[in-house]
Image: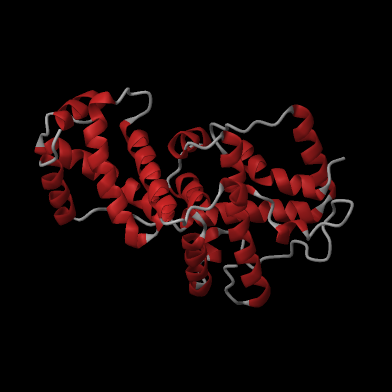
Amino acid sequence: MYENETVLIDGLIAKRDDAFRYAIEQYQGSMMYLARSFVGDKLADEVVQETWCSAMRALKGFEKRSSLKTWLLRIVANEAKTRLRKENRMTSLEALTAADPEFASRFDDNGHWGAHRPGDWRADSPEALISSEELKLCLDLMISSLPDLQAATLNLREQQGYSLAEICNILEVSESNVRVLLHRARNRLYRCVEHFQETGECCTQ
Amino acid sequence: MITCQTLFNSASDYVESTDSSNPVVRFSLKQRISIRFHLLLCKYCRLYLKQIRLTSRTASALTVEVTPTDQEIERLVQRLKQLDD
């Protein structure tokens, strides 16, 4: 019966055990995954616990302009941002969306690829790429070291399959900024794969 | 004609507009023609676009399953039940 969101919300407001259990089973995984990408493994649990508590307190005022899951993820993102700001660890949006100087230097004055241009990769599928355990570990490391909003955008888009519009809503960032954040995050990973293809070594800088 | 750098800057958006079933990012006909034309002539941009697509799919392939344990669920249920209004 809790597949119906209105029934679920009523159950949560009435503090029914089975409603809590259902909601946690449905949403906790996704909330935790987003929180980990945002604040790292250590703090994620605390952020998600806080989210549940503040969400349950605010539930009566939930206006259903988005799904319950999107609303919860938005609170996760807010809790994570608050936490990072408190610890002075939040990267400014300007820094996260600024052009990557490493890539900018790859083009000549006419905007053509210069000496460091795309070369062949010895793999043409994700499976083939990550069949190298070393590269797989390197990419995992790279993904976990991406800064907050870049990491969260990549997580929501590539790993949780959210649309750009939903990501704007969850992260409270404009659509054009979400697009740039995604572009930057993908290019950080691109450089990581490229460096590994060229040298056989992991570089997450 | 657009430059490689311009194509590079819109590559991620281009991937979104062509690969997503419900794209938010849409390019005008004129923009799509300029990109296609550039790709036809520039093998490095063709390669870059193919590789950025592959990078994006690889990020998806690295998805891990995050599931709470029964114990974690129960602990959270108890905590939420005891919340004051």
Q: Residue at x 83, y 46 (%)?
A: B3
Residue A42: name its quadrant.
Answer: bottom left
Q: Position of residue A156 (x, y in %)?
A: 45, 45
Q: Residue furthest bottom?
A: A200
The colour scheme applied to this rendered structure is secondary structure
Q: Position of residue B40 (x, y in %)?
A: 82, 45
Q: Nearer the viewer, residue A202 or A178?
A: A178
Residue B31: name its quadrant.
Answer: top right
Asked whether residue B66 is in view, the answer is no
Q: Residue at x 31, y 32 (%)?
A: A68
Horizontal side, residue A94 vs residue A5: left or right:
right
Q: Residue at x 77, y 40 (%)?
A: B35
Q: Nearer the viewer, residue A18 or A74?
A: A74
- Quadrant occupied by the C terminus of chain B: top left
Horizontal side, residue A83 vs residue A179: left or right:
left
Q: Is residue B71 above or below residue A182?
A: below
- Quadrant occupied by the N terminus of chain B: top right
Q: How many marks?
A: 0
Asked whether residue A63 is in view, the answer is yes
Q: Position of residue A179 (x, y in %)?
A: 60, 41
Q: Position of residue A95 (x, y in %)?
A: 61, 51
Residue A77: name its quadrant.
Answer: top left
Horizontal side, residue B24 vs residue A59: left or right:
right
Horizontal side, residue A87 vs residue B23: left or right:
left
Q: Nearer the viewer, residue A16 or B29?
A: A16
